[in-house]
Structures are given as C-alpha cells and as structure tokens.
Amino acid sequence: MEQNKAARRNLMIMWFSNFFVSGSMTMVLPFLSLYIETFGNFSEKYVQQWSGWTFGITFVTAFLFSPIWGRIGDRFGRKKILIFSAFGMAFSIFMMGFVESVWQLFVLRLFMGIFSGFISMSQAFISTQTPKDIAGRVLGTLQTGGITGSLVGPLLGGVLADSFGYSATFQGTSIAIFISAILVMLTTEYKMSDGKKGTKSSYTSKEVLSHITKNPLLLSVLLISTLIQIAHFSIQPILSLYVNEIHGHENLALYSGIAFSAAGLGNLMMARQWGKIADKIGYVKILIMLLFMAAIVYLPGGFVTSIWQLVIIRFLLGIAIGGIVPVRVAYIRQEAPISMQGEVLGYNTSLRFLGNVIGPVMGGMVAGYFGFSAVFIITSLLLLISGFLLFISMQRSPKLNLEGKS
C-alpha cells in the first residue's frame, strides 16, 4: 500500500518535471535563428546554416551519451542521474543568455546535449516502479507531461522573447529546469522485483547488447525507433514553408504554429489511451497497427489544397504517433530485466536522436529536389516499411505466437 502511494506520488512529480523540461527545451526553438542574427550582420544563408547546426548538435551529443547515462543510472540510481541531468541542462541554457558569438552558442548547445537524457531517464525511473500489466497506461500518462510542455513551450518562449528579450528568456528557461531538479529530489527511488529466477542486480554492457541481439523482436522495436523519428521529423523544419505554399504569407507564423501544434494535440489526447489498449491487447500488435495508421494518414498531407486540410491530417497523425512512444517503452519494460532497463532505454533514446538528426536533413533535401509532396510520400513509405518489418519480426517470434501477446 505504501509502495503504491509512493509510485503515484513519483508519477505526479515526474509528470511536472517532464512538463518543465520539455517546455523549457522547446521554448527557445522559435527564436534560435533570430538570436543568431543578433551576433552580427550575417547573410540569410549563414544564419540558416548555423541555425541547423546549433539545433542539430544537441541531438548528436545526446545520441552518444544516452546509453552511458542509462548504464550509470542502472548501477548507481536513476534519481541521481535525473538531478545531475537537470542541473547540467539548466546551467547550459542559463549561459546561452550571455553568449556573444555563434560559436559560443554552438558549444553550449553541444554541451547541453550531454545532459539531454532527462525524459528517457524519467521513463526508466517510472518504468522500474510500474507493474508490467499497467505499464502502457502509466507511461502514456507520463508522456502527456512532456507533450503538454512541448505545446506550451514554443508559445511561451515567443511571448517572453518579445516582452523581455532573448537573454532573459534563456535565463527564465534555466530556472524552470532548475525547478525540475528540485522536484526530482522529492521522489522516492525503488525498484520492483522482476519476479524471475536468475535475474541479476547488474549487467555488463556486453550482456545488455547480447540480451538485445538474442531477442529479434526487441532489436526490431529499437531499430525502428530511428525510422519513426526520421518520418516524424522529416517535415517539421520545412512545415512553415509548406504552409506558405498552400496558404500564403498572411499570418504565416500563426498558421504554421497551428499546423505544428495539431499533431501535439492529437498526441496528448491519445497517448494514455493507446497505452491502456496495448496493456490489454499486446504492445507489438498495437505498435504495428499505429505504424500502418500513421502511414495511411500521413500520405494525403502532400496533396492538400488548404491549411485546414493540413491541420486535420496533422491532428490525425498525432493521434496515431501518440501511442508509439509509451507503448514502445512499455514493451521494453516487459522484455528487459529491471537492472538493465536504463541502458536499453538509453539505446532506444540514442536511436531516436539519430532519427532526429537524419529526418530534417532528409526532408530538406527531398523537398529541395522533388517538392513537398515527395516528403510526404517518402515519409509514408518509411512508416509502412517500419510496420512491415515489425510484423515480420512478430511472426518469427515463437514466444509471441504461443502467448498471443507481446
């Protein structure tokens, strides 16, 4: 009873922590390129290039460090890593308010990526305290905190930047992440028992990788993380340009924001519900269904003739995409022993960050050479391929076929 009370309290605290961290990390995105322009009299091409590099470098370092933090968390406690991560991000963002050159901003964004595993570590923290039969619902609830923050963050960041300036916004953002670190200090860390004989209290990296490679279905779920993120991020950097093409320049920022946020709203509405459904039906089965659903919904986006058609399609896409993250993490909760879950989720996060880097580059190149419609077609194909690969892996999994559940 006491443990259940602690679990509910931890979930509530981590929901607000994820809200603050996700909101803070997205708060600076609307004006990153505008901030670079204040460092000197640069050409438009120069600003665009450096905006891309300073945005992307965070994901590169996060890709490299996520499994390392996951492993350290497995061995020494995830609460400590969460606090360290939050303080590291808060310091990095605070110092961004004082930079005087694009190089300084680039280095701090690189440094920030080292500590950017807070969201995935919080998933591991809550996952190890959650019974397997309700993991989808609980992790779906946790995800809504980050989604809500990412919806509020860009809007609030734009308002603060207009009202108080860029430097003050960075400093305010760092305070919000600092609050997250304080909130994590109030949690209680414990792990549920695996309930299996032969499980160990710690695993070497070699044993973790061996566990993943000997489970083809788990390996497929991890690798598909990259394809999903490539698909999800392919249109995001050029979304405002696409809105401009189909709607015109009038109130471009507003309508781009609506189109961008529509997916987040659909995501927010269904993340917890998909988790509950997957707890009953099976995680892999729901993942396959969501991938096919996302592929079908994504394709018409390349052929819309009005902004509201695009908004509706983005909303439906958000509904489909909304279940993929919590269901994927719940499946890892089921397949990986408690004492290695941080490292396994770290690999999952790394592969997601890899997709975050590849997706925008691919989307920009495809749109430049073949037009916007081609981005939607290729993205839809990637989601279809992901669904088929996972379906084939499921069919080849004797365990899954015997049990009838992922």
Image: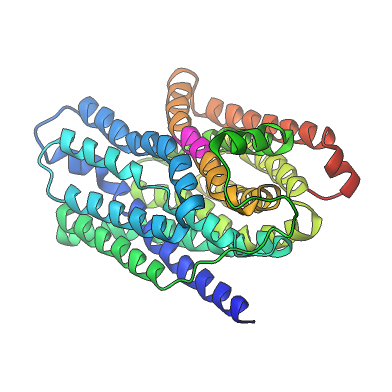
Tell me: residue 284, above or below residue 266: above
Q: Nearer the viewer, residue 339 or 12?
A: 339
Q: Nearer the viewer, residue 284 or 79?
A: 79
Q: Residue furthest top?
A: 369
Q: Nearer the viewer, residue 399 or 291?
A: 399
Left or right: residue 393 compared with residue 6? right
Measured from the top left, where is residue 4 in percent x and y? 62, 76
Measured from the top left, where is residue 307 in percent x and y? 49, 46
Tell me: residue 61, above or below residue 85: above
The colour scheme of the drawn protein is rainbow
Does residue 272 show up?
yes
Q: Is residue 353 magenta?
A: yes
Measured from the top left, where is residue 349 in percent x and y? 51, 42
Does residue 273 show up?
no
Q: Residue furthest right?
A: 402
Left or right: residue 101 compared with residue 237? left
Left or right: residue 204 compared with residue 76? right
User: Which quarter shows the N terminus?
Assistant: bottom right
Q: Quadrant of residue 55?
A: top left
Left or right: residue 114 compared with residue 121? left
In magenta, the rendered stretch is: 350-356
Q: Quadrant of residue 192?
A: bottom right
* Residue drawn at 54 percent across, 59 percent down: 143
Q: Is residue 18 magenta?
A: no
* Residue drawn at 66 percent across, 61 percent down: 135
Q: Principal SS element in the magenta part?
A: helix
* Residue drawn at 45 percent across, 54 percent down: 76
Measured from the top left, where is residue 228 in percent x and y? 58, 37
Q: Residue furthest bottom?
A: 1
Tell me: residue 237, above or below residue 361: below
* Residue drawn at 57 percent across, 32 percent down: 376
Label tally: 0
